[in-house]
Image (cartoon, rainbow, N blue to C red):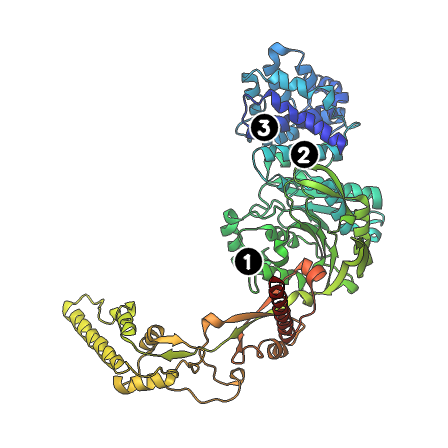
């Protein structure tokens, strides 16, 4: 890591030569493409002369396709530069550096030029933006000399592809921090990638060691390609050196896409498997499925710009598309990427490793998109979620928040079916302190990676004992749960509406000002005569209502809604319609816990005895007193209601038609705060004990004060 820092710090320091001519946010327009050019130059250095000679020999004899193959053969790579120049050579002809630089860039093979165009702004701008501004400001020679300095030796025998990826990532982090962008969204620290790879492949060894085995790996947010290359290296170095591994990815950011593609080119791989574009709205690998998938999607990024596209697909295609289970809140689109990956699982067997923040664990109430997606992932018939590993904070360059690795498998072994393993890797025993890199202050140690992997593979509960301040305590590291432990029913608990009536002048005046009362004496008819007739009729009704209410003034407070409206009917000469009934209740009625319950039809309320929850005909509910109870799936709802609700709300009942099924994984609660649900009577006893203790303490304080 120190070597990575040394090289990247020197490269980034080159910004000092351009700072007077470039805004901070534009430093990356120079630093990143020149770093890539320097790397490619170093890779091609030993065979450059052979390529130039081959070009001179065959340029007028061979077709463009044949010439391309000959030049690649001469370079020993899947790319080349047929010009007479290298970066070092460009610095030796200072009077013609502009013309020569143009020839140098145009001398690259088409696949390299395609990559470079992602630094220049696209094909429509050509390659000239890479150097023209520097040339115009007399900085091209200075910058080129700095990049060919001995301090930036990027030859493959000095800097591996893996290490080069890290250097690129550090530079990207610095450039994004300079421009206040979210650097963390473009790459993932290498040790986290290694842990994810271990978890995804640890149970696949026997399958992958078979002769002739071949697999494909996909990352829908591939960044610089680190997860893909790390996964392939791990497999071929630790499991089967002859294993055929094909890597695929898609990346939205032009520069990181270019770096990922060039990395594959340098390694002799098929760089065309790396696609550029928005994975959600422009999937470039439609219809393709994968054996293994790894990704670190953007954290907490809203998806409002994709909302119409995603919701249209969800509605039109349902479960035949990617988003049939629903969509998360528009403020965080991370779940969309997992839904996308699930759609690409190979029916013969696929494993997914994905990094999330805490939102996908517990955001969203029962019936929300978040919850429904969790249920679709965890519950039958999908049963995809296998394990979640909670990691400590301060592991990423661009964010200090805690993160979680989710492992999904569509071919779970029998012992893992309908179960989820939670691994608590938040303890310091799994990490080591490092020199800060952005917000990254820790990394998962090699020992930590090995231990987490072994715990996952062992698939059993696992605890450790630690000593703090001379006291020992047990920390739960691994626990196995049934899927139904994360499932609950959200039940609506209603309380009855209780209304009392006491008519006063103030109440009558309030009624007169009520919009619906005023509307009684208005008309929408265009015919003047008919309109005037409606108004007259309405005024007569208004007068009649007021006259009836005047008879209630000075009378005792009526605690029964049915009695009040029976009396009202007697003087009014008939029952009020539903609209008038609601208006009178809204304006004249007062909620009163001592009053009798209210029924929708005050003239047809049958006398019922016993608990309201047992009544056949329920009263109207009081919206202000509505409550919800989230009851664990394994618990009997009726027993829960009898034990935890009725003792404290004897007139309550459950409206089971409003039941919603929810799913959440309150991770830390299971490890640190979770206790079996206790009866409310016991909790109340605790409160009473606390009140007694407080009273005793106050007595002592008073005595001391005396």
Callout 3–callout 1 Cβ contact below 8 Å:
no
Please give the count of numbered marks on the rendered protein.
3
Callout 3–callout 2 Cβ contact below 8 Å:
no
The residue at 39%/87% (across/down) is 604
The quadrant in which residue 183 appears is top right
Element at label 3: helix
The nearer-to-camera label among 3 and 2 is: 2
Q: Which residue carries the number 3 mark?
A: 29
The nearer-to-camera label among 1 and 2 is: 2
Q: How crowded is mark 2: few (under 14 residues within 10 Å), some or many (20 or more)?
A: many
Element at label 2: helix
The nearer-to-camera label among 3 and 1 is: 3
| Horizontal side of residue 389 vs 125, given as left or right | right
Numbered label attached to residue 388: none
Q: How far apart are marks 1 and 2 (CA)?
A: 41 Å
Q: Which residue carries the number 2 mark?
A: 170
| Horizontal side of residue 505 vs 223, given as left or right | left
Q: Where is residue 454 in the image (x, y as percent from the top left)?
A: 82, 53
**Quadrant showing the C terminus:** bottom right
Q: Residues within 10 Å of mark 3 (few under 14, many from 20)?
A: some
Q: Can residue 568 be seen in this view?
A: yes
Q: Which residue carries the number 1 mark?
A: 317
Please say if 210 is above or below 48: below
Q: How far apart are marks 3 and 2 (CA)?
A: 15 Å
The residue at 65%/25% (across/down) is 13
């Amino acid at each position: 890591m120190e070597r990575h820092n040394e090289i990247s710090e020197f490269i980034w320091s080159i910004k000092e030569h351009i700072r007077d001519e470039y805004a901070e946010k534009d430093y990356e327009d120079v630093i990143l493409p020149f770093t890539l050019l320097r790397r490619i130059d170093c890779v091609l250095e030993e065979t450059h002369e052979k390529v130039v000679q081959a070009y001179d020999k065959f340029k007028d004899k061979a077709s463009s396709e044949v010439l391309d193959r000959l030049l690649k053969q001469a370079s020993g790579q899947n790319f080349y530069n047929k010009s007479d120049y290298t970066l070092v050579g460009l610095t030796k002809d200072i009077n013609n550096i502009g013309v020569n630089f143009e020839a140098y860039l145009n001398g690259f093979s088409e696949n390299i030029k395609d990559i470079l165009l992602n630094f220049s702004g696209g094909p429509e701008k050509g390659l000239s933006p890479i150097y023209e501004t520097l040339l115009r400001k007399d900085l091209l020679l200075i910058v080129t000399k700095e990049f060919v300095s001995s301090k930036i030796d990027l030859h493959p025998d000095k800097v591996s592809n893996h290490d080069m990826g890290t250097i690129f990532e550090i530079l990207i982090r610095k450039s994004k921090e300079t421009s206040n962008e979210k650097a963390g969204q473009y790459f993932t620290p290498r040790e986290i990638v290694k842990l994810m790879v271990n978890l995804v492949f640890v149970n696949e060894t026997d399958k992958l060691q078979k002769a002739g085995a071949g697999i494909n790996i996909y990352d829908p947010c591939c960044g610089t390609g680190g997860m893909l290359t790390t996964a392939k290296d791990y497999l071929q170095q630790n499991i089967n050196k002859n294993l055929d591994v094909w890597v695929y990815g898609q990346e939205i950011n032009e520069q990181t896409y270019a770096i990922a593609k060039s990395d594959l080119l340098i390694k002799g791989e098929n760089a065309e498997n790396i696609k550029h574009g928005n994975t959600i709205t422009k999937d470039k690998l439609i219809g393709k499925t994968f054996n293994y998938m790894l990704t670190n999607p953007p954290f907490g990024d809203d998806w409002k710009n994709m909302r119409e596209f995603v919701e249209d697909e969800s509605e039109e295609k349902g479960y035949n598309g990617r988003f049939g289970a629903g969509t998360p809140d528009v403020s965080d689109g991370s779940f969309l990427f997992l839904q996308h990956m699930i759609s690409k699982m190979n029916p013969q067997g696929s494993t997914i490793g994905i990094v999330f923040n805490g939102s996908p664990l517990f955001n969203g109430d029962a019936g929300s998109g978040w919850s429904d997606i969790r249920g679709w992932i965890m519950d039958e018939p999908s049963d995809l979620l296998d394990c979640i590993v909670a990691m400590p904070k301060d592991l990423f360059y661009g964010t200090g928040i805690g993160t979680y690795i989710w492992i999904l498998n569509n071919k779970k072994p029998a012992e893992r079916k309908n179960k989820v393993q939670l691994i608590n890797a938040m303890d310091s025993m799994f990490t080591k302190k490092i020199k800060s890199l952005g917000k990254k202050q820790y990394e998962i140690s090699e020992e930590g990676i090995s231990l987490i992997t072994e715990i996952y593979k062992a698939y059993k509960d696992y605890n450790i004992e630690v000593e703090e301040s001379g006291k020992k305590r047990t920390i739960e590291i691994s626990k196995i749960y049934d899927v139904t432990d994360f499932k609950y029913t959200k039940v609506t608990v209603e309380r009855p509406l209780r209304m009392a009536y006491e008519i006063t002048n103030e109440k009558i005046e309030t009624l007169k000002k009520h919009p619906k009362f005023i509307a009684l004496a208005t008309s929408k008819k265009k015919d003047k005569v008919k309109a005037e007739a409606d108004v007259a009729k309405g005024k007569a009704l208004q007068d009649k209502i007021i006259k009836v209410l005047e008879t209630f003034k000075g009378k005792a407070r009526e605690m029964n809604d049915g009695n009040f409206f029976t009396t009202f009917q007697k003087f009014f000469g008939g029952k009020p319609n539903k609209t008038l009934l609601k208006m009178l209740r809204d304006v004249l009625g007062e909620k009163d816990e001592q009053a009798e319950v209210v029924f929708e039809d005050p003239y047809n309320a049958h006398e019922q005895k016993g608990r309201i929850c047992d009544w056949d005909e329920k009263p109207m509910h009081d919206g202000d007193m509505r409550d919800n109870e989230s009851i664990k799936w394994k618990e009997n709802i009726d027993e829960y209601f009898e034990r935890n609700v009725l003792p404290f709300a004897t007139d309550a009942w459950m409206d089971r038609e409003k039941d919603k099924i929810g799913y959440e994984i309150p991770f830390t609660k299971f490890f640190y705060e979770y206790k079996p649900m206790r009866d409310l009577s016991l909790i109340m006893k605790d409160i009473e004990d606390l009140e007694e203790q407080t009273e005793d303490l106050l007595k002592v304080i008073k005595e001391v004060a005396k």
